Amino acid sequence: MKNKLSGLAVPYVIWMAIFVVAPIIMMVVYAFSTSNGNFTFGNFADMGLYASVFGRSFKLAIIATIICLLIGYPVSYMMAKEGPRFQKVAMVIIMLPMWMNFLLRTYSWMSILENNGLLNQFFASIGLFDLINNIGMRMAANPELYVPIDHFNMIGTQGAVVLGMVYNYLPFMILPIYSVIVKLDNSLLEAARDLGANNMRVFRKVILPLSLPGVLSGVTMVFVPSVSTFAISRLLGGGTQMMLGDLIEQQFLGGAYDPYLGAAISLVMMVIVVVCMAVMNHFGEGEEQAVML
Amino acid sequence: MKKTNRTGSRLIMALVFIFLYAPIFLLIIFSFNAGDSSAVWKGFSLSWYGSLFKNRIIMESVYTTLLVSILATIIATVAGTFAAIGLYSLSRRWRDPLLTVNNIPMMNADIVTGVGLCLFFAAFFRFWGSFAVWFNSIQEVITLPTRLHLGFTTLLLAHIAFNIPYVILNVAPKLRQMDKNLVDAAKDLGCTWFMAFRKVILPEIKPGIVSGALIAFTMSIDDFVISYFTAGSSTSTLAMTIYGMTKKRITPEINAISTLLFVVVLVLLVIVNVKEAQQEKKAKRPVAVIAAEEVRKADRAEFFKARPWIKRTVTAVIVCAIGLSIISLSRATYGQPVVNVCSWGEYIDPELITMFEEQTGIRVNYQTAESNEALYSLLKSGGGDYDVIVPSDYMVARLIEEDMLEELDYSNIPNFELIDRRFRNLSYDPENKYTVPYAWGTVGIIYNTSLVEDEVHDFSVLYDEKYAGDVLLINNSRDAIGIALKHLGYSMNTTNEDEIREAYQLLVDATEKGVYQGKVMDEIYQKMEGGNAAISTYYAGDYLTMLENNEDLAFVVPERGSNWFVDSMCILKDSPHKAEAEAWINFIASTEASLMNMDYIWYASPNSEALEQYPEYYYELYEEELDPEIYNIMVAPAETLERCELYVNLPADILALYKELWIQLGI
């Protein structure tokens, strides 16, 4: 009996060998070969050129993750404190945007942030630029040289890319944190209060540690896609804020064909992500039961 | 006090929800826009919803998306459920490492999974190619195809591969909660293992299966990155189609289809939630009511039990319907002769595709690539399942050099005789064995006269701090560096490294001064037409298209000269549809098609009759004279062409230098 059921695992193990393990092996092979098929470390050496891309990717992804956490945690907490009906509706509201393609939603931001976009049009219509120009003119040492502005430069900046990431991945932060907090045993909180802890202390000593697994899985779910995105940086960064994802995409389907270098970069990225997650899981006291959705 | 707290927190939540929904509402609002802009409101209209169903590219990609998601979900759910049961009856020693492997696709960034699969498929195709050649050589009964491509099958496999882990993740906790003795008990009571599975295990883990399937489906529908790397070019999901469009202009038809999908999901979610609420209410009803309902339910069950054929017929009908629709749709797409064409964005009158299909019965699968370099990557990585491509001069030379093009049989292309002598036997194809020219034109400066006060004569405006943040740099190395070379007075085809580095330095300095708002190819339409940028360099034909939407734009070919180009139709080596491809080339080269195309894309045709007849054609169509200035921009006169240079293919070391410099500029 037992043997029969465990036999069910065999096809899947074969499947995993083909579709999970083999692609990674292929990636390793490519990463260590030249275009003639010889062994080399050159692809990794070449990567020094791209240190600034690595730096930018991690910087922007970390900023986006922190912002998501700062918004996501309080919102999840507030949601969990509401009645069951409200919670249900709120869940639907947060899940629903995922059903509209993220590229479209990002494109929509593009039309908001453009130099001649909706936000700048709005600012102009409420007279914000006139106000700034008036003040600027008076404050400037030499009013002759003052260049009046008629728009804010938003598109093509790092801020726009971070905004795109926060916008797209915020639900991935809220959902896991919420699902952990909502399951917290209320009697634990009451016990803490009975023992004389004030609200702040209850939060710090009870709620926060217990919600940590949710936070960790939220952080991973925001950080990993942020650091590897290429569509968001392409649309909102205007091609000037190159990220790791753009770099990889260029080596395969973009303007600079070099799958060997692309594989090497992917491999490095994979290793970094795995290491980061291992470290975080370690701090999460082995709580690797990532609470998905 | 508690109350104020709550309003405060609700306010914050409301703000977050507004943040999440503002762009979505914008999309929905602009799906009802009478104009085609996504920023300027021109009045209410439902026209995009009507034209949506006639847009074949969108409808096909919606169909592909749904089909892939549904198939992948079904297969992944079944496979994942069995796999989870199998894994959970293994001992911990085996199970834990296997589960770790299972988690890899979920932990990895999508792009890493996509790249891995892409490389894996490419390697498999190479292996298959040599195997098929060998296999075909030893026997003659079965002929195996030697060339495989990324396509629907690889897309489906990739989706299944990333969906299964999610199913397992959801089924696993339910299995852990289940009492293992239950299965043994069932067996002791005489169940076969299959019955035990159906009657005992399945009901226990059903909630896990359902949520796993739901997540798998959501992931499939929402996925872009993995599809992008595994679907190749001839299969396109909705997300891929949208990505292709974000580079140019998103047609509001996309807004319309997204709104429709959004509303469907919204309605489904509301129904599910209302039903759940009803069931909760039901639980609170008096016993008598529940009993009565149970009786009625039992009666109904009895009714169907006595007539098992009802259930069977219904199942059979549903299965048949699904099967038939799949067969009919795949027949509609695969049974017909096909030609796969890859060209550039906004580079054909779509009417021509319909005309060709009606005349010949050959289905045209029309795709676009972003730039010559991107096309080259696509071909090299096995993603380009094309027959006809339309590369520019220097790329044609490179493809010929690398033996990637098929020689044409000009007896099948009689319309080649109509091609003007000026456009034959050019440097990239000196004996004219591989190409039939498609269009030609010049590269020049496009600027917005309402944003640029000075008169523009030469490329210096592209490097001038004065226009910081208003200039768009063309996003391919050849054009960007070539223009800089020309500006410095060098040849665009120079192989002198110092000159190239000097040109590159010009770009670096301008970048450091913040001159460039972005690097764009076809994004230029939306940026220039909307007045979001003031200065750019692009092709004359595209300028005329932009002019139709924004009259403030002006075009100038600098005194010091610029680039002129010829894009030619070629057939890729070993194309399985050579006859169809030649029919297509011949059709496009005809005078009638050339005239229609010139009128639509504003690029000059190489067809001598069409060049001559166009002003007349324009007059008949619009009943007004064609502005000679516009004709001169489209069909550059000889003296302009004399100032301009045609690109030639550069030697490999210079190409490598271009690539290296270009990447350095980007980072």
Image (tube, rainbow, N blue to C red):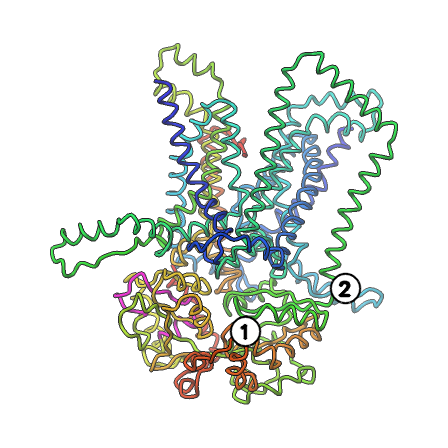
B108, above or below A94, in the image: below
- As drawn, the residue found furthest toward the top would be A194
Name the residue carrying label 1: B391
Say whether residue B111 is left or right of residue A16.
Answer: left
Residue B120 appearing in the image: no
Which percent across, then down, holds residue B417? 62, 87
B138, above or below B160, in the image: below
| Mark sitting earlier along the chain (2/1) | 2
The magenta-colored residue range is: B462-484
Secondary structure, mark 2, is loop
Which percent across, then down, holds residue A227? 44, 47
Q: Callout 2 environment at 10 Å: few (<14), some (14 to 19), or many (20+)?
A: some
Q: Nearer the viewer, residue B664 or B386?
A: B386
| Label 2: chain letter | B
B648, above or below B36, in the image: below
Which percent across, then down, holds residue B635? 47, 82
B4, above or below B510, in the image: above
Q: Amino acid at mark 1?
A: Pro
Measured in 3D between alpha carbons, the distance from the residue under mark 2 to the one under mark 1, in whole angstroms, is 31 Å
Which residue is rendered at x = 30% and y = 52% of the image? Answer: A124
Q: Quadrant of the N terminus of chain B?
A: top left
- Would you say the residues marked 2 and 1 are in contact, meaning their CB atoms lie under 8 Å apart? no
Q: Callout 1 environment at 10 Å: few (<14), some (14 to 19), or many (20+)?
A: many
Name the residue carrying label 2: B144
